């Protein structure tokens, strides 16, 4: 009996550990509300507040972003102005295209290739490679980017950065849509 209990506990622990390693899928969010309409949310002016944390979870940089967003049909522009805690500034202009089945593509000057994304329920997931300048060098870093609509005006964003499959850190943002 004791041996069976230990075996059951070990099996449960293994299943829990393996479940913790599973990758989330966009379809998991299909029933979540409020439903994210990317064209509606990213239309107008938004403010964002974020942090970049390294692998240990230490905040390396804080930043704010003002986004001016507009759409013409299925094509959108997200014009982002970043201000970092060290005083540096950066601009990124995303050009998005809406496709079938909640899918989107995106490009920007510092994005390598084309970003691919999809919405379901309250979530948007997209992945892309960004040319990231660090201390005089430029690195191509992969982003796995998840956004979750919390209310009609607030969205949370968590992006994991990696290179060669090694996790480098995370970017966490809170978006607030202006009235």
Image (spheres, rainbow, N blue to C red):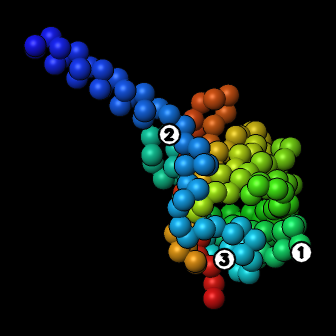
| Quadrant of the snapshot with the C terminus | bottom right
Quadrant of res 80: bottom right
Mark 2 surroundings: few (<14), some (14-19) or many (≥20) residues within 10 A: few
Residue 42 drawn above or below residue 103: below
Task: Measure the C-alpha gap from mark 3 to mark 2.
Answer: 28 Å
Q: Residue 55: which disc?
A: 2
Q: Which residue is mark 1?
A: 72
Q: Nearer the viewer, mark 3 or mark 2?
A: 3
Q: From the viewer's perspective, is 150 left or right of 66?
A: left
Gap between marks 1 and 3, in whole Å?
18 Å
Q: Please name whichever residue, 150 or 120, is drawn nearer the observer in this view of the structure.
A: 120
Please tell me which of labels 2 and 1 falls first in the chain: 2
CB contact under 8 Å: marks 1 and 3:
no
Work out whether residue 29 can be spotted. Answer: yes
Check whether the beta carbons of the residues at disc 2 and disc 1 lie within 8 A of each other.
no
Residue 50 in which image quadrant: bottom right
Residue that badge 3 annotates: 46
């Amino acid at each position: 009996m004791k041996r069976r209990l230990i075996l059951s506990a070990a099996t449960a622990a293994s299943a829990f550990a393996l479940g913790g390693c599973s990758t989330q899928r966009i379809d998991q969010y299909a029933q979540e509300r409020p439903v994210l309409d990317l064209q509606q949310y990213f239309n107008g002016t938004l403010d964002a507040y974020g942090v970049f944390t390294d692998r240990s979870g230490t905040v390396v940089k804080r930043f704010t972003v003002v986004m001016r967003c507009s759409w013409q049909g299925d094509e959108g522009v997200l014009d982002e102005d970043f201000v970092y805690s060290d005083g540096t500034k950066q601009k990124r202009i995303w050009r998005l295209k809406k496709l079938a089945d909640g899918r989107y593509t995106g490009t920007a000057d510092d994005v390598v290739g084309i970003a691919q994304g999809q919405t379901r329920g309250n979530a948007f997931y997209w992945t892309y490679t960004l040319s990231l300048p660090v201390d005089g060098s430029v690195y191509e870093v992969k982003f796995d980017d998840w956004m979750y609509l919390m209310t009609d005006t607030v969205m949370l964003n968590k992006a994991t950065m990696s290179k060669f499959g090694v996790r480098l850190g995370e970017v966490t943002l809170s978006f607030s849509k202006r009235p």
